[in-house]
Image (tube, rainbow, N blue to C red):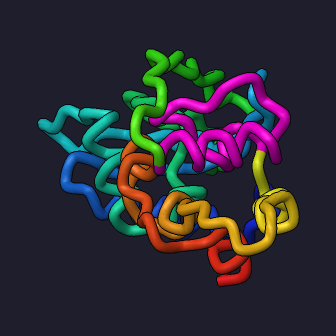
Amino acid sequence: MKFRGQRIELGEIEAALVSHGSVLSAAVVVRGSAMGDQLVGYVVPAVGSVVDVSVLRGFVGERVPGYMVPAAVVVLDAFPLNSSGKLDRALLPEPVFEARVFRAPVSSVELVVASAFVGVLGVDRVGLDDDFFELGGNSSSRLGLSCASPKNSRRPYRSAFYSKRPPSRNLPHVSNHTSVKEAALR
């Protein structure tokens, strides 16, 4: 399926969730939110396990691209089933999207990347923990970063899109040597 301009497989995300030792079964759905469509993972813990959601999201972020990491993970005792014994996705509870504490960009690299995101996405501000795709970006708007940059400008943000780190770790680790145009075209 297409999600924010990217081709994703919900089954691939579910497999990444289930590959964590604390998870017995998983389902991933796309849910609407105030921030636009979001991926939501639903998991049932393995017997005797407790699921640490932030650890699980980090684990999944090491196995799939950042735009495929669920914005929220909901832990359930069991999945709701329909009369045929199959998962009833309509009965999955609404997720609670946690508000992040805003951490302002500090270094020159972080400020340039955040400024580029603000310009292309039309948002008021972008912090260190904000994710381009969670803010409404997609593959088309990502290309807009190259069009918005002055010729020969050096705006380092490639790893913010292509890193397999969780989104919260992308912005501080961008390279100082990648131009907007190079990043958008790779």
| Residue 3 on image: x %, y % | 77, 58
Q: In what quadrant of the picture does the C terminus appear?
A: bottom right
Identity of the residue drawn at 78% across and 29% down:
123
Q: Dividing the image into 4 quarters, which one contains the N terminus? A: bottom right
Q: Residue at x 35, y 58 (%)?
A: 18
Q: Residue at x 63, y 74 (%)?
A: 183
Furthest-left residue in this view: 48
| Residue 127 can be seen, yes or no | yes
Q: Is residue 148 left or right of residue 89?
A: right
Label count reads 0
Question: Relative to residue 18, is residue 167 depicted above or below?
Answer: above
Depth check, front residue: 122 or 81: 122
Task: Please state the horizontal and vertical placement of residue 77, each as a whole percent of the image.
Answer: 37, 28
Residue at (38% x, 47% y) in the render: 172
| 150 in magenta | no
Question: As drawn, is 114 to the left or to the right of 141?
Answer: left
Give the vertical position of 158 relative to 165 (above or below): below
Q: Quadrant of residue 80?
A: top right
Q: Nearer the viewer, residue 47 or 100?
A: 100
Left or right of 32? Residue 114 is: left
**What's the magenta region?**
109-136
Place of residue 121 in the rendered image (x, y in percent of width and height, measured from the top left) = 81, 41
Tell me if I can see residue 1 in this picture: no
Up-down relation of residue 83 to residue 93 (above or below):
below
The answer to whether residue 128 is magenta is: yes
